[in-house]
């Protein structure tokens, strides 16, 4: 029982997740429904896929504000590249070619951020703030302020498709999201790179003294985040069959909110993929459930802001209580 | 003590160097005070006295640090790089476009930059105290909607008063959460960004607000009026800049802001009330946002409910280009003004040269990173980071 209690005290996000699920199941009509849960997973997937990479970067002690802009750029490349002349011979396989171009674009931009953080030693907040402004400009220059539509309907069919698993038809994007959660979780907990990520975030100087190459680990994490953001751009644009230059505005704020709800420390060295997943899921459930209860969308902003600050206060209280307890012992 | 030279910046970098001393002392055997450091401090004092005694020439020499014993052009470039970049940009645009160098163009750029500029002044103080304020964009939306919506209902002056109270309340919440509860300012103001945006939308019901009778209300003075041929927003921007420059460099409060930003624990041990100082820094930021909202509402005579969206980042960009460190303890109002103007003139110049509107954001990206890189590199003494 004590173990149970300390689990929820240390990871309050799970208690929160269960609480809002129970609440909406009781009070929101049509919420407790397998179809709706599939919807929630799809709604969470775009922010969630980015949040996986963001968790790595934040455990590393860095941050990335440019993910919204990178997502827009990759979505635009994904839709536009399908009609590039070099893929003209490929027929439907042009989608695969465009897919690789989009992921490559994401990794290039994420890698550029990582490289600048590594080589210049400029605060990651500033580097990615610049990138956020600049890449958004790039998107508008590239698209000439126009929305792009995919001519091949197969592209949006893929986004809408589902995989039969027993009696259920689970959306492909939801499966992709869950598989990625598992993969990145394994990367963080079971590999040398994952362990070093924690070490670098916890104390960069100590990591250097322990012989860890701090820079490349930061670079790789930004590369992963860029690739995942590209993937999120692909899934988002395939759901709509289109890409707009304003896509992904504010996504960086939502993603960081979700990751922080999951308990990841901004200072670095602490965090987990599963809890980030729970944080993003909480946001998606809140939005979905309040929508079901016909609450105006405006209130979600207030509630999310309030929760974010409440989590911070709770975290402060818990950690100061832990300090007091350890002082008593 | 001269109020307008770099003494405060030197002071903080001096303490920072001193703070970095103990770990380094474990390397070489002699652990006494660094003779070179002492020497340069003395030279600095002499230079300061020379500035007080001498005229413009001496001021110029002090600005560039020509009399300092460890003088090098790289340092000058890093320290006054923003000024240099500003001059280069102005000369470049003047040569490239014949319409750039005119009174009308300059005053229109200044007027356009003034809203971001006014907000940047307040946020600069928050940044110097070692915190961030990301909620200013939402706060601008909130205050502008309030002032515009209430203008027709209860009259201009009460509307402005209500908006002021609302803005200060938001600032007070920020100040309480960051100052009293000591929460991380980035996340607190991120949460406030979301919450205030929500309140704005709830208040306006998603509708945009308008002032119906635009021609005969004295409220138009703040955004559209002129005094002696100079637009009121510009005067407000520059006036506030002068006042806040004095607040930072001429008052105890200003010194406390620098002290807390340099090393909060040391400042508290020396008896500075951290809670009060941080709280007031957020109030000042909120006050500046209110001024910007009045200018915005008066100029547009209407408001969208997301009018300030994204402004927080443009404001931060201007401050960063101006050379304030996000870690706190350094920064100048005058340099923030130059940062705002540099970005404003780049936007204007690129448009005059026929580039598309969005090109300026690409240039801003490069300017931000190069500016901060040079600054960080000069403090470090080498351009590349020490990371392997």
Image (tube, grey):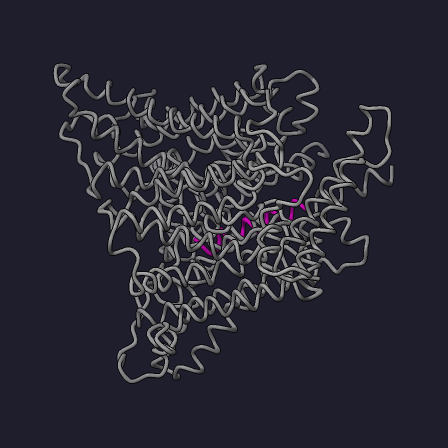
Judge by depth and name the residue closer to the eye, B332 or A114.
B332
Left or right: where A146 falls relative to B315: left
Q: Which of A252 and A311 is in front in this view?
A: A252
Asked whether B290 falls inside the magenta stretch, the response is no
What residue do we see at 34% from left, 77% from top? B225
Image quarter (top left, top right, bottom left or bottom right) of the C terminus of chain B: top right
On the image, the x and y values in percent for residue A97 come to: 24, 18
Q: Quick check: B383 left or right of B11?
A: left
Q: Can residue A63 be seen in this view?
A: yes
The secondary structure that most of the magenta stretch takes on is: helix
Q: Residue at x 13, y 30 (%)?
A: A151
Q: What stretch is highlighted in magenta?
A: A301-316
Q: Quadrant of the N terminus of chain B?
A: bottom right
- Residue at image position (36%, 67%) is B204
Which residue corresponds to the image point at 53% horizontal and 26% vertical from the top-left? A118
Asked if the magenta segment contains residue A307, the reply would be yes
Q: Nearer the viewer, residue B335 or B365?
A: B335
Up the image or down, B198 lies above or below A118; here it is below
Q: In this view, does A163 lie to the left or right of B262?
A: left
Which image quadrant for residue A45?
A: top left
Where residue A58 appears, as percent x and y from the top left, is 55, 33
**Relative image position of residue B249 (x, y in whole percent):** 65, 62
Tell me if residue A168 can be seen: no
Q: Measuring from the top left, give residue B328's x and y in whole percent.
A: 63, 48
In the foreground, B137 or A135: A135
């Amino acid at each position: 029982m004590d173990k149970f209690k300390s689990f929820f005290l240390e990871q309050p996000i799970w208690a929160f997740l269960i609480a809002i699920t129970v609440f909406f199941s009781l009070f929101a009509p049509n919420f407790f429904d397998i179809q709706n849960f599939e919807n929630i997973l799809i709604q969470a997937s775009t922010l969630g896929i980015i949040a996986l990479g963001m968790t790595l970067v934040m455990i590393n002690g860095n941050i990335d504000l440019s993910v919204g802009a990178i997502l827009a750029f990759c979505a635009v490349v994904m839709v536009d590249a399908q009609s590039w002349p070099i893929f003209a011979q490929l027929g439907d396989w042009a989608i695969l070619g465009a897919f690789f171009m989009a992921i490559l674009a994401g990794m290039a931009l994420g890698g550029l951020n990582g490289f600048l953080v590594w080589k210049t030693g400029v605060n990651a907040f500033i580097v990615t703030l610049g990138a956020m402004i600049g890449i958004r400009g790039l998107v508008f220059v590239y698209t000439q302020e126009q929305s792009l539509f995919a001519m091949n309907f197969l592209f949006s069919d893929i986004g809408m498709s589902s995989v039969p698993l027993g009696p259920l038809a689970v959306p492909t994007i939801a499966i992709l999201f869950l598989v990625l959660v598992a993969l990145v979780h394994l990367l963080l907990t079971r590999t040398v790179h994952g362990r070093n990520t924690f070490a670098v975030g916890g104390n960069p100087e100590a990591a250097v003294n322990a012989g860890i190459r701090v820079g490349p680990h930061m670079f790789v994490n930004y590369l992963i985040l860029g690739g995942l953001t590209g993937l999120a751009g692909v899934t988002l644009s395939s759901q709509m069959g289109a890409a707009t230059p304003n896509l992904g505005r504010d996504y960086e704020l939502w993603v960081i909110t979700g990751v922080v709800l999951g308990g990841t420390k901004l200072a670095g060295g602490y965090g987990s993929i599963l809890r980030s997943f729970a944080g993003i899921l909480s946001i998606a459930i809140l939005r979905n459930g309040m929508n079901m209860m016909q609450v105006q969308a405006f209130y979600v902003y207030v509630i999310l802001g309030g929760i974010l600050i409440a989590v911070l206060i709770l975290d402060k209280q818990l950690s100061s209580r832990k300090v007091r307890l350890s002082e008593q012992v | 003590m001269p109020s307008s030279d770099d003494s405060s910046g030197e002071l903080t970098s001096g303490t920072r160097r001193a703070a970095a001393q103990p770990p380094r002392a474990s390397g070489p055997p002699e652990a006494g005070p660094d003779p070179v450091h002492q020497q340069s401090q003395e030279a600095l004092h002499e230079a300061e006295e020379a500035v007080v005694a001498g005229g413009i020439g001496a001021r110029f020499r002090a600005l560039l640090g020509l009399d300092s014993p460890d003088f090098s052009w790289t340092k000058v470039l890093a320290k006054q790089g923003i000024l240099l970049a500003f001059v280069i940009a102005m000369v470049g645009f003047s040569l490239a476009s014949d319409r750039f160098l005119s009174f009308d163009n300059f005053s229109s750029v200044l007027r356009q930059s003034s809203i971001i500029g006014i907000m940047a002044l307040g946020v600069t103080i928050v940044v110097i105290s070692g915190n961030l304020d990301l909620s200013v964009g939402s706060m601008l939306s909130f205050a502008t909607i309030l002032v515009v919506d209430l203008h027709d209902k209860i009259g201009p002056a009460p509307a402005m008063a209500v908006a002021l109270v609302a803005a200060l309340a938001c600032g007070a919440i920020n100040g309480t959460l960051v100052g009293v509860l000591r929460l991380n300012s980035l996340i607190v103001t991120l949460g406030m960004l979301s919450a205030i945006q929500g309140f704005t939308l709830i208040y306006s019901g998603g509708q945009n607000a308008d002032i119906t009778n635009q021609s005969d209300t004295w409220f138009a003075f703040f955004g559209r009026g002129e005094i002696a041929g100079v637009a009121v927003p510009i005067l407000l921007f520059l006036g506030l800049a002068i006042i806040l420059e004095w607040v930072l460099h001429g008052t105890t409060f200003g010194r406390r802001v620098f002290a807390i930003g340099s090393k909060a624990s040391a400042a508290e041990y020396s008896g500075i009330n951290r809670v009060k100082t941080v709280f007031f820094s957020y109030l000042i930021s909120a006050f500046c946002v209110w001024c910007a909202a009045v200018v915005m509402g008066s100029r547009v005579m209407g408001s969208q409910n997301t009018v300030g969206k994204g402004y927080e980042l443009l404001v931060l960009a201007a401050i960063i280009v101006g050379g304030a460190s996000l870690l706190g303890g350094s920064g100048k109002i005058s340099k923030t003004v130059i940062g705002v103007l540099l970005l404003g003139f780049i936007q204007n110049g690129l448009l005059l040269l026929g580039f598309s509107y969005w090109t300026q954001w690409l240039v801003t990206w490069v300017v931000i990173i190069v500016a901060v890189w040079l600054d960080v590199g000069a403090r470090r003494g080498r351009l590349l980071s020490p990371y392997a």
